Image (spheres, rainbow, N blue to C red):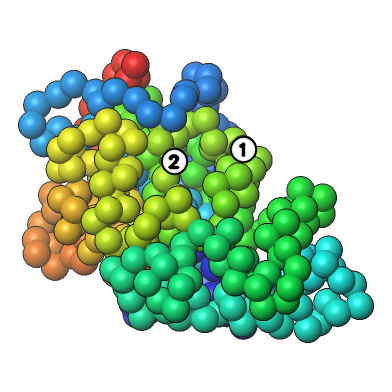
Amino acid sequence: MVGFSWFAPDGDPGTHAAAGADTAAGPMAGGPVPADGPTPTGGTAPTGGPGQLAAVVFDWGGTLTPFHDVDLLDLWRLAALEISPSQADEITAILAGLEASWWHSRDAAGGHAGNGSEGGMTGSIAELLAAASARLGVDVAAAVVQAASRRDLTAWTPHTMCDPEALLLVHLVRARGLLIGLLTNTRWPRLWHERMLQRDGLLDLFHARVYTSDLPFDKPHPIAFQAVLEALGISDPSRVLFVGDRVRTDIRGARAAGMRTVLVRDGGSGAVHPGMAGHAGQLPADAVIGRLGQLLEVLDAFGAARPGTPPPR
């Protein structure tokens, strides 16, 4: 078994609590509020005084989706079947081995070595599969793209579906006039992620969507966080709240970039933030929540605009 690598593995202990946390209970369990229509990528930061929140940026895997450990061999098998059904086992093993080597180099580098500096591997699925193509003597990249477009990916649906609270939460955050961003470590194409976001009704709710497969560096490198700031049109990182489930890549990286941070710790009993007595200086992030719906309490504690604030134009 390997970590489900739509997102990069993170070795920080305690980031993911025991499975089975109740993520659907509470005030977020109701249906989504009506959307206000598609919003193009990019936006204009809401007006406000220095330090007032202007945007919330979410990680994807483990934050907007539940965290899973699953075997990815079936994914590579789809591509292998496109190439040569009679050699599917051999091709699958080669692809899985290349993927494992790539993640090992990325994890050891902590996102700071740069995509491409470790044995010629990069954060781009095209270049990852180019290495496989050279190894096998066939166009593996074309086979993967064809498999993704022709074959049913329902085997991964349970591991890519958004958290039950995510859709309503994002609507409610937007209702406060805040910009919404997405920043996720990945080497899969933008198209694949956006198919899943579209399926879950989230795609058009983001003002900016940044995938590190399009960048030279992963989180926690500052370039990754600067990319989402630029995409949102925000120059002051202190006006951005980053929400993620990984201490090293999400929380430490966002803090180093100057953002405020919220750690999603599965199974937590409730929101903990600096406004609560007895917690000053004891948090791994500016706030810690046990489920996504508790983010609204954190926004209140940070003095974010109230619901009904005009959306950014």
Residue 53, given in percent of the width and then of the height, sits at 20, 35
Q: Are marks 1 and 2 in contact (CB under 8 Å)?
A: no
Query: Residue at position x 9%, y 61% from top?
Result: 280
> How far apart in space, not on screen, are marks 1 and 2 (Cα)?
13 Å
Q: Residues within 10 Å of mark 1 (few under 14, many from 20)?
A: few
Looking at the image, which is closer to me, 133 or 284?
133
89 relative to 159, above or below? below
Which of the 4 image quarters holds residue 116? bottom left
**What label does residue 182 carry, if any?**
none
Q: Amino acid at mark 2?
A: Arg
Residue 302, given in percent of the width and then of the height, sits at 18, 41
**How many numbered tags mark residues here?**
2
Which residue is identified by label 1?
198
Work out which quarter of the rendered image holds the C terminus and state it.
top left
Observer able to see residue 206 = yes
Residue 28, given in percent of the width and then of the height, sits at 47, 42
Query: Residue at position x 71%, y 82% from top?
Result: 93
Q: Amino acid at mark 1?
A: Gln
Looking at the rendered image, the disc whose residue lies closer to the viewer, 1 or 2, is: 2
Q: What SS does tag 2 mark? A: strand
Q: Residues within 10 Å of mark 2 (few under 14, many from 20)?
A: many
**What label does residue 209 carry, if any?**
2
Left or right, 198 with reference to 177: right
Looking at the image, which is closer to me, 188 or 134?
134
Query: Residue at position x 61%, y 66% from top?
Result: 130
Q: Earlier in the sequence, mark 1 or mark 2?
A: 1
Looking at the image, which is closer to me, 141 or 180?
141
Residue 262, given in percent of the width and then of the height, sits at 28, 54
Work out which quarter of the rendered image holds the N terminus and state it.
bottom right
Left or right, 49 with reference to 39: left
